[in-house]
Amino acid sequence: MLATIILYRLGHSLPERHTVSITVMMPKARVLVWAALTDCAAMPQWWQAVQAIRFETTGDGDVLAWNKDARGKEIAFRTREEIAPERLVREIVGDDLPFGGTWTYELTAGGGATRIKLTEDGFIKPPLFRASRSYS
């Protein structure tokens, strides 16, 4: 009980919104990296947390990619911006989720390799989730 109270207080002191970036170099041509990032159906092959994908087209024409995890939970994502092969912005869809935000992939070619800058601009509502996220 005391640990829960401490984690709650710690999480409550942390901001709900966050932005974090990481940059990596891939020894592949930008066109190949772009193809992998935009092939949602193949996501389970390179993202271990995703077990399956299903697609849904909404009434306004948006295509949602529903990612299913090992526990059977599904979260919908949509592509918000796509400038091939340079910039891809995906966002989590769902107002009832305890977290959300966007991932922005920026790809730069150079010397047969690709520099990928990934920026997460998100939020975590529950203080306990924010506390546990700060230690992962």
Image: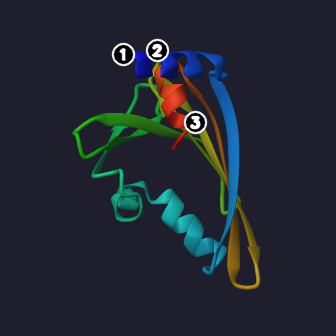
Along the line of sight, which residue is nearer the eye, 18 or 6? 6
Residue at 67% from the left image edge and 32% from the top image edge? 18
Gap in angstroms between the C-alphas marked 3 and 2: 16 Å
Q: Position of residue 34 (x, y in %)?
A: 58, 65
Query: Is the residue marked by circle 2 packed among few (<14), some (14-19), or many (20+) residues within 10 Å?
Result: few
**Secondary element at tag 2:** helix
Gap in angstroms between the C-alphas marked 2 and 1: 6 Å
Look at the picture and state if 108 lies above or below 100: below
Look at the picture and state if 94 lies above or below 113: above
Tell me where residue 80 sits by quadrant. Answer: top right
The reply to whether discs 2 and 1 touch (Cβ–Cβ < 8 Å) is: yes
Look at the picture and state if 95 lies above or below 18: above
Viewed as shown, does residue 58 lie left or right of 36? left
| Number of the label disc, if any, that sits on residue 134 | 3
Q: Quadrant of the N terminus?
A: top left
The reply to whether discs 3 and 2 touch (Cβ–Cβ < 8 Å) is: no
Query: Is the residue marked by circle 1 packed among few (<14), some (14-19), or many (20+) residues within 10 Å?
Result: few
Viewed as shown, does residue 42 lie left or right of 119? left
Residue denoted by label 1:
1
Tell me where residue 47 sits by quadrant. Answer: bottom left
Gap in angstroms between the C-alphas marked 1 and 3: 20 Å
User: What amino acid does circle 3 point to?
Assistant: Ser
Residue at 46% from the left image edge and 38% from the top image edge? 77
**Secondary element at tag 3:** loop
Q: Looking at this view, name the residue that lies furthest to the bottom.
A: 111
Residue 74 visible? The answer is yes
The reply to whether discs 1 and 3 touch (Cβ–Cβ < 8 Å) is: no
Q: Position of residue 44 (x, y in %)?
A: 34, 58
